[in-house]
Every structure is written in structure tokens, then in C-alpha cells.
Amino acid sequence: MNSILLAGAIGALGTLLGTRVAIGILVAKGYGQYVRDDGPREHLKKAGTPTMGGTVIIVATLLAYFFAHLFTFSKPTASGLLLMFLLVGLGFVGFLDDWLKISRARSLGLDSKSKLALQSVIAIVFAVVSLQFPDARGVTPASTSVSFLRDLPWLTLPAAAAVAWIVFISAAMSNGANLTDGLDGLATGVSSAIFAAYTIITIWQFSKNCAYASSGPQCYEVRDPHDLALISLALAGACFGFLWWNASPAKIFMGDSGSLAIGGAVAGLAILSRTELLSVVLCGVFVIEAVSVALQVGYFKATKAMSKDGKGKRLLKMAPLHHHFEMKGWAEQTVVVRFWILAGVCVAFALGLFYTEWVVGR
């Protein structure tokens, strides 16, 4: 438990202090955000705000993870290293996207196909390797079974389908986090709550792990829950510390460097902790934001195909959903706080489902 708390403290202090340094460096180099011309007019004043702050979250989490292991003289686990790989790998894709936006002086970086291809390559490597490295009991970091609150034995997939499923979860969560990152502090606050919830889940899985004879029939077949809890709290702390600088009015944006990395970490935690379908509830805000974009695009294309003048209609004033409420006249801070409340409700409901399943099954 000491190593978990230490990781959380290092993660929080790393971003709280490190982000201030990063802001100075980014301002000096002129690495500022480019804002969409078709977005809310209030966002134009944010042009030039330093971006790529997500790199600080990644570095702080890496330092927290390895210093916590060094402090306790313990070895990193397969699950922990795989989760860090997904975090850093998808963060690198986001960094490329941010860098192209800055170097090309426009609000568009990697095209959607290139970004998805890079995300898929990293997710495939993660998926294939995570199905290897069984422990002494034969439990691998990931599983070929689809999971809800634990693996569903009646929904086991062939190896190739399991890899495709893991890739889908990784892409969906990373893009969901990316779409949520559109207002000051929105994605950072939501992510802090999600990672805090995963800390609780994985600590509980560690205390009730099937590796211990006294765990009972409702034990959890998760390979390295303690290490997953350590990273979860490190990420929660890192996001919380970053929020000091990212809250409205933001002094820095996390950029795709942070949002893709955070989404990847959430997906990795869902896969490695055997809570894949539960993550849909837990990360309800990410899911809602992604669905709002899909509905907007789908409705526009459908109405365009059916209209005589070839013009499509929009379901929302603007997607993702948080921009729709801005366009309706809500203040940015109001949207952010209400979405934080929604995230809290989703997290509470997911934790309730997780604990209720264990109680009922005793």
C-alpha cells in the first residue's frame, strides 16, 4: 500500500511542479494551440495557449511508477509494463499530432487514417503481448474472454478475435478521451475521477485475488492488481496536479499527447483488470462524447443523401456534446462542472455495480 500512495504523491507533485516548468519552456518556444475557426467564438481567445502538456502527465506517471518500485525494492510486473507501453505509445501518437499542428501552424495534425493506423499498430502489439507471460498459476495479463465485472467464461473469443476486441477498446477509449478534451479542465477532471475509481477496483481485486487461498469463491483472476492500482493512483495524481494549471482559464492544454495517452491507459486498465464492459459505464462521459460525434456525422450524411438539394442537417448545434451546450449559451465553466458531476455519477454507479456483484455472489 505504501508504494501505491507514494506513486500517487509523486504523480501529483510531478505535474503540479513540472507543468509550471513546461509552460515556461513552451511559451519561450512559441508552441501554442491553434483553434478551430468553426468553433465557439469564445475559444478564439485561447489561441496561443501552450499545448502538449500531456507529456508532463506521461513523464510524471513514469517517474511515479519506477520510483515507487525502487523505493520498495520490487520488480515491475508484466501487466504494469504493458500498461505503461500503451500509455507512452498512444501518447507518442498524440505528440506527433500536436507537433504537426504546431509546425504547420494550423489546427489539424495527423489525418484521421494515419492516426488510427498508428493507434492500431500500438494496440495490436499490446494485445498480442498481453496474451503472453502467464504467471505461476497460468494467468496472463489480458484474457481472450470478454469481461464485464470479471471474465465471462461463456464469451471466450478465438485469439485473433480477442486481439481485434482489445484493439477496438484501445481505439475507442483513446478517441473518446480525445474528443472530451475540448474545454478547460474537462478531460483532466473526468480522468482524475476514472483513475481514482480504478485505484479502488484494483486494490479490491488485490485483496480478494485468487492467488490467496483465503480469498473465497468470488476471488478475482487478475494477474497483477497491485501494480495496476499503483499506476491508477499515479495517473489520478498526475491528472489532479495538472488540473491546477489546466482549470479555467487554462494556462496549458494537454493536447493529443495527453488525451490519447489517458484514453489508452483507461483502455489498458479495463482490459488488464477484466472490467472491459464495466468501463463503458465508468467512462460514461467519454462514451457519450464519442457517441455524440458518431450521431452527428451519421445524421448529417443520412439527411444529405435523402434531401433534394444535397444539404444535410445537424442533430446537434456542434459536436462533441460539450460544444453543443456552449452553442446554446451555457458558460464554459458551467458545462465543465456539470460534466464533472455526470462523470461522478457514472463512477459511483460503476463502483456500485462492481461491489454489488461481489456481495451478491458471496
Image (tube, grey):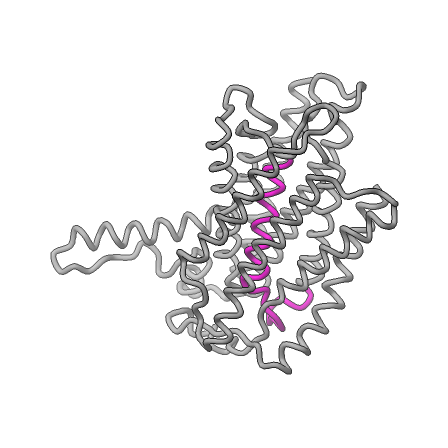
Between 335 and 199, the one nearer to me in the picture: 199
| Nearer to us in this view, 320 or 344 | 320
Q: Is residue 165 magenta?
A: no
Q: Residue at x 19, y 60 (%)?
A: 311
Which secondary structure is most common in the magenta stretch? helix
| Image quarter (top left, top right, bottom left or bottom right) of the N terminus | top right
268 in the magenta segment = yes
The residue depicted at 49 percent of the width and 54 percent of the height is 118
Q: Position of residue 91 (x, y in %)?
A: 59, 57
Q: Toward which corner of the image does residue 32 lie, by quadrant?
A: bottom right
Tell me residue 202's x, y (percent): 71, 37
Which quadrant is home to the C terminus? top right
Q: Is residue 68 left or right of residue 18?
A: right
Q: Nearer the viewer, residue 45 or 335?
A: 45
The residue under the point 54% across, 60% down is 94
User: How many numbered badges does the structure rendering display?
Assistant: 0
Outermost residue, left side: 308
Magenta residue span: 244-273
Q: Is residue 56 left or right of residue 190?
A: right
Give how far across and how far down residue 195 sits, in percent. Answer: 66, 47
Q: Position of residue 105 (x, y in %)?
A: 46, 77
**Up-down relation of residue 263 to residue 220 (above or below):** below
Figure check: 84 above or below 109? above
Q: In the figure, 216 relative to 278: above or below? A: above
Q: Quadrant of residue 14?
A: bottom right
